[in-house]
Amino acid sequence: MQKKLKYWQDKLKLNDWVIVLVDDCPVNDFVGANRQGETEYDTEHKSAVIRIIRKEEYGERILPFVKEQVLIHELLHIKFGLLWDSNTELQNALLHQYIEDLAKAFYEVKNECKQ
């Protein structure tokens, strides 16, 4: 996953950020509840910690667990971080949905290029 982190940091132009990836993170170490991944970041210092849940703790959910897609999603949170705190639930929900759509699209395009 560290290679994938470096790959996506480069593609998303986040190379000037210091990002620590905590892969296979126990659910008890998450700040929020019911998440596949989460990011705590500091835009001023361009630093972040990304946590991705252990596959074993993902549980029985409708959608499959795709760790690389979760990583992309969390990196996009960093990219769009300054837009995130709008203080409106609707805008935050839409932004989160757009981030997820982009993460899926980037992951799919990368895998299509391999074929």
Image (tube, grey):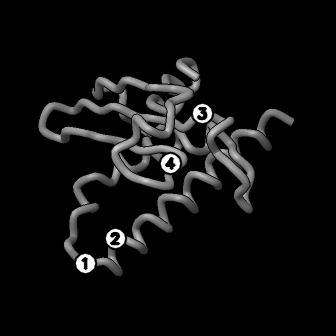
Q: How busy is the neighbourhood of tag 1: few (under 14 within 10 Å), some, or many (20 plus)?
A: few
Residue at (40, 35) in percent of width and height = 29
Tags 4 and 2 touching, CB below 8 Å? no
- Measure the alpha-carbon separation of dots 2 and 3: 26 Å
Residue 90, above or below 103: below
Q: Secondary structure at mark 3?
A: loop
Determine which residue is flagged by label 3.
54
Q: Quadrant of residue 16?
A: top left
Q: Say left or right for 22 vs 18.
A: right
Q: Secondary structure at mark 2?
A: helix
Under mark 1, the amino acid is Thr
Q: How busy is the neighbourhood of tag 2: few (under 14 within 10 Å), some, or many (20 plus)?
A: some
Determine which residue is flagged by label 2.
92
Quadrant where the N terminus sits is top right
- Measure the alpha-carbon separation of dots 3 and 1: 31 Å
Determine which residue is flagged by label 4.
73
Q: Secondary structure at mark 1?
A: loop
Q: Nearer the viewer, residue 71 or 58?
A: 58
- Measure the alpha-carbon separation of dots 4 and 3: 16 Å
Q: How busy is the neighbourhood of tag 3: few (under 14 within 10 Å), some, or many (20 plus)?
A: some
- Measure the alpha-carbon separation of dots 1 and 4: 21 Å
User: Could you tell me residue 42's position as x and y percent?
Assistant: 19, 38
Query: Which of pointers 3 and 1 indicates the residue nearer the eye?
Result: 3
Quadrant where the C terminus sits is top right
